[in-house]
Amino acid sequence: MFKDLFRKPKYVTVHADTARKDIPEGLWQKCPECNEILYSKELEKYLKTCVKCGYSFRMGARERIKATVDEGTFVEIDADLTSTNPLSFADYPAKLAKTQEATKLKEAIVTGEAAIEGKPVVIGVMDAGFVMGSMGSVVGEKVARAIERAIERRVPLIIFAASGGARMQEGIISLMQMAKTCGALARLHEAGILYISVFTDPTTGGVTASFASMGDIVLAEPGAVIGFTGPRVIEQTIRQTLPEGFQTAEFLLKHGFIDMVVTRTQMRETLAALLDLHVSGGSENG
Amino acid sequence: MANVILEFEKPILELEAKIEELQTFSKEKEIDLSEEVQTLQKKVETLKKSIYGNLTPWQSVMIARHPERPATIDYIKMIFEGFMELHGDRFYGDDPAIIGGIARFKGQPVTVIGHAKGKDTKENLVRNFGMPHPEGYRKALRLMEQAEKFNRPIITFVDTPGAYPGIGAEERGEALAIATNLTKMMALRVPVIATVIGEGGSGGALAIAVADHVSMLENAVYSVSSPEVFASILWKDSTKAQDAAVMMKMTSKDILSLGIIDEVIPEPIGGAHKDLQKIAGTLADSLQKALNNLKQQPIETVLEKRYDKFRSIGHYISG
Ligand SMILES: [Zn+2]
């Protein structure tokens, strides 16, 4: 359903005569949005966003953490949790092993404690490169544990979402992670702890329909595709082409489902400013 | 109502037709064929047991989707007294794909909420085949919070292919509506009992099924997506839905053994639609037992157990 969201980023190969001859291949990338030629070094400097149009290239969990938290403060938790194969699904363990090898990740989310501008947080960052960032037992468990840790430590929780939805290979167990994570958020809410949710491209299905939508403050990166049902399935169901810009961060902002669209280069300072307004995980007056 | 016969049921019907033929023949010709008829009747019973007792997952899906399968409205009529339907989410509209209201169950006021499938094409168009829009979930939540205010237990019936995938649904926040229900249901300070009576499709089903006691009718199915969607995601081929139904472990027996539900409610042989009276009775007994059990416990205990029930679902190892 969500496959089309996960097309490879368009690192377009440009014919030698159209590219700048003086830059060796691999040192530049082309922006899929505005076709600007971007120097790789500069692209890294601007956190993988296009300087011309602001397009955000996909970002892995580890790079995202590095770009977000104070240097040297991140301490990973539950790093070793890995999925088993509860439905005895053929090829699932092999697929996991291959993905783990390729991504150097154990699962589709990395969680831990860190500080942003000196303010302690519990942070979780999903990675769309790991089985489409899908939520199975491990993602659900790590999110629930991160929430519980934020309650216990009384520090704010920040989660960057990126997901194609539920992990199909774990069937109904994946579905139940939606109730599990939302249940934990009910307790976070009761405890008066701040939760900032950040949608990144793409977030659909069971993750949008659970913890990612439930932030006290919900942010999104420009252009990120965010929705419940993936666009292809909607088109198949209603048999019409979807309007331009449907299910983008801007579309959700217009329809009232997110608080702010924040460019990646502004994200850290935006988070810091929000955290500054909430001490002890809760209100300054509390 | 025309009888809809599923492909795998045909041998039973053929045999039953043969018995009828023999009986007519014996009457007309005044020949005693009772021994032959009896033999065939025994054969039918054995055949029924062997077919219905060994349904493949796909056959279960077919029964769960059977056009004559009792729907929420049937159980409301059979099990509750004086049902008063309440409408609307107080914000956008009233979603006919979810039906809800107040009724008495064994004399006690309760709030009843369920997905509503239609009985025919015309009603299905109105009810959108039981696929709710956000306003349906918001209506459900409004009624649940109302139940909490007046200390009424909540009884839900799950029967949906899934939340509706459409433009309006996205514009009005289908995902947020579901997420909100999942979050708020976990904290409702009244007992909640959910029964999957037909199709339990995806987040659209779960959004009214975060409950203290969750059961499934024997031939109901419960899954992360429809088998068609599952097949199209994993194998890019929706025609492999039958294989998907096996892989997904979506039958009541599988879901029980995975520890997701508390109880499987047995159906009359051939499915709930063969004997509404009987299944309604069995279901009512199950609901009463679950409710009595929950009412005996302090609500704090109920809430703690509800949390633990969902919190503990997951299969993982450390390392
Ligand atoms: Zn650009």
Image: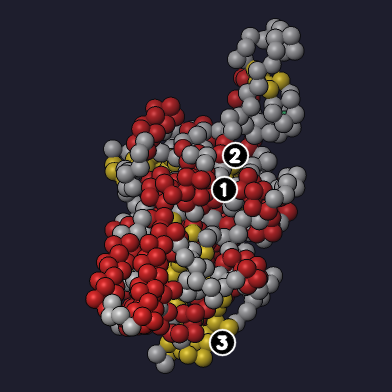
Toward the front, the furthest residue is B29
Question: From what the image shows, is residue A208 above or below residue A17?
Answer: below
Q: Report if the CB atoms under discs 2 and 3 are less than 8 Å apart.
A: no
> At 71% across and 20% down in the image, what residue appears?
A37
Compare residues B260 and A146 and report the one nearer the observer.
Answer: B260
Circle 1 residue: A204
Circle 2 residue: A5
- In this rendering, does residue A50 appear at all? yes
Badge 1 and badge 2 both on one subunit: yes
Circle 3 residue: B84
Badge 2 and badge 3 both on one subunit: no
Badge 2, how many Cα within 10 Å: few under 14, some, many 20+? some
Report the Cα–Cα distance between label 1 and label 2: 9 Å
* Amino acid on which the number 3 mark rests in the picture: Met
> At 47% across and 49% down in the image, what residue appears?
B241
- The quarter of the picture showing ligand 1: top right
* Amino acid on which the number 2 mark rests in the picture: Leu
Counting from the top left corner in percent of width and height, residue A6 is at 57, 36
> At 60% across and 15% down in the image, what residue appears?
A26
Report the Cα–Cα distance between label 1 and label 3: 37 Å
- Which image quarter holds the C terminus of chain B? top left
